[in-house]
Image: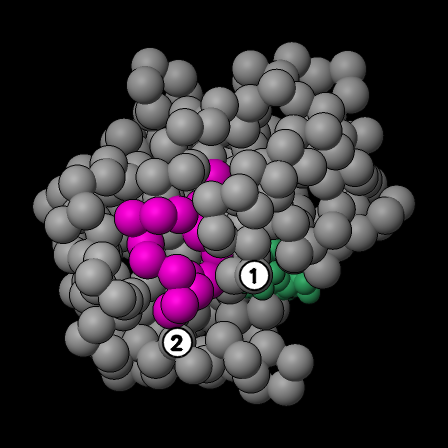
Amino acid sequence: MEIKNCILKVDGNEYPAIGFGTYRLTGEICRNAVSEAIQTGYRIIDTAAYYTNFASIAEALKGHDREQFYLISKVWHDMQEPDNIRLDFEKALRELETDYLDAYLIHWPNSKIPIEKSLGAMRDLPVRHIGLSNVTVNHMRRALEAGIMISWVQVEMHPLFYDNALLKFCQNHGIGHQAWRPLNQGRLQDDELLATIGIKYNKTASQIALRWILQHGSIPIPGSKTALHIRENFQIQDFSLSDEEMLKINARAAAGTRVRLTGKHGFLDEFDFSYEECWPRKSL
Ligand code: NAD
């Protein structure tokens, strides 16, 4: 798995190194947004059972060659026992109208289910690559200890927060890295530092954010229902940030803090990112 000249190469296949995120896109809005993304050139599409939009994505993919696309889905924390994983995966295939997934990730690890159990079940499914989302180096070590090959991690990363230790760990172990919330939910469009850097390249603050991620060797997966933004976000291949600009953004992002979940997602915060032991040991 490598990114070269803004192209992601996986097992001999090539895709533009930017994914289209579909969180909060459902129904016709999702179908139209994904169609627009496909027309723009996106080939990596990120979804999850939690997003309830498989059927809309399937509609947008109709008439296109399935093999040209890299489809990612994620299993929610309440479906991570092996039998449930199979059900979740089958539902994804059925509703996405496909007979395989390119990547299947654990969305938020469930602290009550041993990682090797869930990953082991995922390995037996018709999926090219498996991976983890919302993890730290601690979790990765634990997963690798279990001897299961992981191809991807998908974590929060944008110019106001990144986990550089995890990024380096992934690079050292040949594990691909995907950046969720790459625009900090659109709020980076008014960021002063990014906007100032953008003037030099005739790019928006959002494009600078995405380019910073890409230059770190990570795949940004921005989402939008607006055609203008969908196209804007894709135009990050024709310029490069200088080392000095990268370092400036790094310094600020390294000092940031990750998102904590509240409200209806509060239950996921039981999953404390600072824990040494992230999943119960096999013996538990
Ligand atoms: P994002 O940073 O991609 O922001 C999306 C929002 O930003 C859009 O709704 C739109 O309002 C705005 N926007 C998009 N492009 C813009 C532009 N060029 N200028 C100004 N505003 C713009 O945040 P996100 O949607 O939360 O994350 C992206 C994707 O990451 C999701 O769709 C999903 O696929 C994935 N994700 C995964 C997890 C996980 O737990 N694995 C969590 C969150 C998101």
The label number, if any, that marks residue 271 in the structure image: 2
The N terminus - image quarter: top left
Q: How is the structure coloured here?
A: one colour
Q: Nearer the viewer, mark 1 or mark 2?
A: 1
Name the residue type under label 1: Asp
For ligand 1, which image quadrant applies? bottom right
Name the residue type under label 2: Phe
Q: Is residue 243 above or below residue 53?
A: below
Q: Among all residues in the image, which is located at the extreme right?
A: 28
The label number, if any, that marks residue 100 in the structure image: none
Q: Distance between the residues labelled 1 and 2?
A: 13 Å
The C terminus - image quarter: bottom left
Residue at 23% in and 39% down: 148
104 on left or right of 69: left
Residue at 68% in and 54% down: 51
| Residue 64 shows in this picture | yes
Check contact, mark 1 vs mark 2: CB within 8 A.
no
SS label for mark 2: loop
Magenta segment includes 182: no
19 on left or right of 9: right
The residue carrying pointer 1 sits among few (fewer than 14), some (14 to 19) or many (20 or more) residues within 10 Å by Cα, namely: few
In the image, 87 versus 71, the foreground residue is 87
Q: In this view, does 144 lie above or below 158?
A: above
Q: Mark 1 points at which residue?
A: 78
In the image, 88 versus 100, the foreground residue is 88
Looking at the rendering, the stretch of residues picked out in magenta corresponds to: 104-118
Residue at 81% in and 30% down: 59
Residue at 35% in and 48% down: 117
